[in-house]
Amino acid sequence: MDLECHITIRCALHRIDFLRAYIEESGWSFSRIAGDPLLGDYIFCYATSHFTSEIQSHKETHDVSLLLQSAGFDVLRRKIERVILDQRYQNNIWNSIL
């Protein structure tokens, strides 16, 4: 079973590089968007990782979110999803991400 974990962080533009370093040093992936349909018109950053163990996914998501909060980042959400299918359409073919 693949579990995809996300931590959502609202971040000031001048702190994004600092946040990216924290996330990537933790072994997670970093991404960001400007504006979110549900959360509003801010810059939102995301820490994302995959796990096969429910226990490990809970622990890692909890630990990384606390690390980010202790560094002064505004953590808004933690989410763990069970991935059933994850594919991207590239070069006229569907490719599995996992």
Image: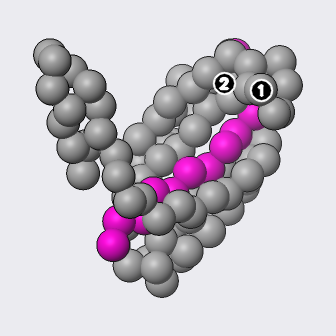
Tell whether position 10 is magenta: yes
Q: Residue furthest bottom?
A: 55
Q: Residue at x 56, y 63 (%)?
A: 80
Say whether residue 19 is left or right of residue 12: left
The residue pinned by badge 2 equals 15
Q: Is residue 94 visible?
A: yes
- Along the viewing direction, whichever of 85 and 69 lies nearer the viewer: 85
Residue 37 occupies quadrant: top right
Span shown in magenta: 1-13
Tell whether position 89 is magenta: no
Q: Residue at x 41, y 41 (%)?
A: 29
The percent position of residue 70, horizontal first and vertical second, equals: 72, 55
Give the main secondary structure of the magenta stretch.
strand
Say whether residue 74 is left or right of residue 3: right
Q: Element at badge 1?
A: loop
- Along the viewing direction, whichever of 18 and 42 lies nearer the viewer: 42
